[in-house]
């Protein structure tokens, strides 16, 4: 029998209890798009084919690419959805008009 636990609070999840799966992919962003790259007369399919032919299996596994998978209990899921990056929430302060 497979047993799950919440990856945030480490609580063991019961078989009947709802759990949530969070999957994240981290990879380098695309390069900037320059106006000359937006030409409408280009054969994009041919360019893509050339790029794919030039790749080997090792090139497909780029350094800096990571995949993560987490199981969350319902309470931790609610907290995650409200603040997915885990940043500290700063409270707004008001300056009185005295």
Image: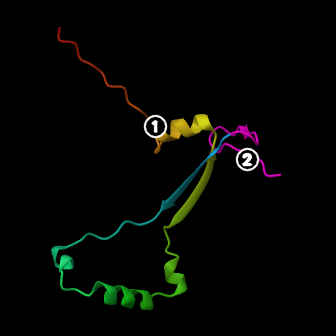
Q: Which residue is mark 2?
A: 4
Residue 92, image x, y percentages: 32, 25
Percent of width and height locating residue 78: 53, 36
Secondary element under disc 2, as helix, strand or loop, is strand
Q: CA distance from mark 2 to mark 1?
A: 23 Å
* Rendered view: 40 above or below 85: below
Closer to the camera in the image, 2 or 27: 2
Quadrant assignment, res 87: top left
Q: Assign the C terminus to one quadrant of the image.
A: top left
**Residue segment shown in magenta:** 1-17
| Numbered disc total | 2
Instruction: Assign a secondary structure to mark 1.
Output: helix
Q: Residues within 10 Å of mark 1 (few under 14, many from 20)?
A: few
Q: Is residue 78 left or right of residue 42?
A: right
Give the side of residue 92 with respect to residue 2, left or right.
Answer: left
Instruction: Please name the predominant secondary structure of the magenta segment in the image.
Output: loop
Which residue: 53% across, 64% down?
A: 66
Based on the picture, tell me whether residue 5 belongs to the magenta stretch.
yes
Q: Nearer the viewer, residue 95 or 4?
A: 4
Residue extending farthest front: 16
Asked if residue 46 lies left or right of residue 59, the reply is left
Q: Position of residue 39 (x, y in %)?
A: 17, 80
Residue in the picture at 22% in, 86% down? 42
Instruction: Name the residue at 31% across, 71% down.
Output: 31
- Mark 2, other Cα within 10 Å: few <14 / some 14–19 / many ≥20: some
In the rendered image, which residue does mark 1 sit on? 82
Q: Residue at x 55, y 55 (%)?
A: 23
Is 72 left, or right, of 62 in this rendering?
Answer: right
């Amino acid at each position: 029998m497979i047993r799950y636990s919440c990856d945030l609070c480490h609580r063991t999840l019961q078989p009947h209890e709802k759990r949530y799966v969070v999957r994240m992919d981290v990879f380098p962003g695309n390069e900037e798009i320059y106006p000359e790259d937006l030409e409408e007369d280009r054969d994009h399919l041919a360019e893509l084919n050339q790029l794919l032919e030039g790749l080997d299996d090792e090139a497909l596994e780029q350094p800096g690419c990571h995949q993560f998978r987490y199981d969350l209990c319902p309470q931790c899921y609610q907290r995650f959805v409200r603040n997915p990056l885990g940043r500290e929430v700063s409270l707004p302060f008001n300056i009185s008009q005295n």
